[in-house]
Image: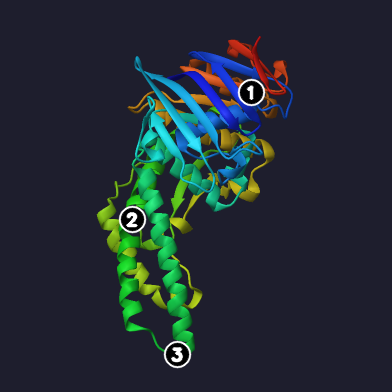
Amino acid sequence: MYLRHLQVTDFRSWEHVDLPLRAGPTVLVGPNGRGKTNLLEAIGYIATLSSHRVATDAPLVRHGCDRALVRAAVVNEGRELTVELEIAPGRANRARINRGAVGKPRDVLGILRTVLFSPEDLALVRGDPSERRRFLDELLVQRAPRYAGVRSEYDRVLRQRNALLKSLGRSRRGRGEEDPYAASTLQVWDNHLATTGAELLAARLNLVADLAPFVASSYAEVAPDSRPALISYRSSLGAALPEGSGTPDGPRVTPEELAEVLLRVLGELRDAELERGVSLVGPHRDDLDLVLGRAPAKGYASHGESWSFALALRLASYQLLRDEAGGEPVLLLDDVFAELDTRRRARLADVATKAEQVLVTAAVEGDVPVELDGVRYRVSEGEVTRD
């Protein structure tokens, strides 16, 4: 899989860019603040419908404009598809495939698969659990695009249930009793949360089981003198989760068995949830544990170890997607070589040279390993030119 062409209009700082691409390495060189990262962000948006830098679409549209356009020609196993996304904050985004409109933007997911490594990835190790949940869900969607709908539906059910919990809690505190109708309505939302939550949870657990060996081997190669790296899934279900689930040698869990567990635990926590007005169990409260030796990476890993763990997570994601059906992902490396020492730089360069397509950004030409000497573009203020 590779990008043959990228076109952006009114995306971030770019009024318009037409960028021909080809398989193999492509390097974008230019001073910081000139828009190199914006181009990789546009490619990543085509693949995931989200940005690795911001949580909303509004910052993606150039100042003073009401919409942005991103168009990419993707070649996969000899077949070319053109994907176009119109980003319009405050309105529904629109998508086209080969210039034909599709029902929902998420219908384009799976056409392009990418793995992006950037300085922001340190947050995977040092940041909040939401960063790691997002990492899992984005990888899950690239692996099986239908989970974009599952995640969206879970978020919707969670908002509705939390609103009802707040309402019921206020009623109980104010009148000293529950509204029977509202209580029966909550049971309906319990069932919805258990069903959608179990589907998302089962997919995450099985993903972590598949990803863990790749993380361990990638970290060992990047930092051979460090302690071994392990990942595991920490569920808000705790001991109620089937034993061994989420581990490489453990059983594969199904949504059906997890839905029963979720529904039972929701019943046990009913009073506490009404008191606090929030859902206390479910995928939204889970985390991905990152461990070095016997200590959690967060708070105990050095700066170099944190970089190594972040790099191992991305390399493992690339290896997992590459080994599965759907086309080898495009590798995006955003100004990361300047942050890496010689050993880590060599390991990343070794993987990148074997990729079908890799796009690299750098502020200084010398930061890019000679192994990635390919097509080179100069990025200046408002202009991209072939070197």
Q: Is residue 268 visible?
A: yes
Determine whether the residue tagged by mark 1 lies in a helix, strand or loop.
strand
Q: Name the spot of residue 34 as percent of width and height, x first.
A: 71, 26
Q: Report the Cα–Cα distance between label 1 and label 2.
A: 39 Å
Residue type of the residue flagged with mark 1: Thr
Which residue: 62% across, 12% down? 376
Report crowding for label 2: few under 14, some 14 to 19, many 20 or more residues within 10 A (C-alpha): many
Q: Label for residue 369? A: none
Discs 3, 1 touching: Cβ within 8 Å: no
Give the residue at mark 3. 175
Residue with the mark numbered 2: 196
Query: What residue sits right under mark 1 in the picture?
Result: 361
Res. 374 image quadrant: top right
The image position of residue 155, as x and y in percent, is: 42, 56
Mark 1 touches mark 2? (CB < 8 Å): no
249 lies left or right of 307: left
Q: Nearer the viewer, residue 167 or 337?
A: 167
Residue 239's spot in the image, x, y percent? 39, 62
Residue found at the far bottom of this picture: 176
Identify residue type, mark 2.
Thr
The relative height of residue 192 versus residue 28 in the rendered view (above or below) is: below
Q: Which type of secondary structure does the marked residue at label 3 adopt?
A: helix
Q: Quadrant of the N terminus?
A: top left
First-in-chain label (3 vs 2): 3
* Real-space CA distance between mark 3 and mark 1, rounded to the nearest whole angstrom: 61 Å
Crowding at mark 1 (Cα within 10 Å: few <14, some 14-19, many 20+): many
Labels 1 and 2: the sequence-earlier one = 2
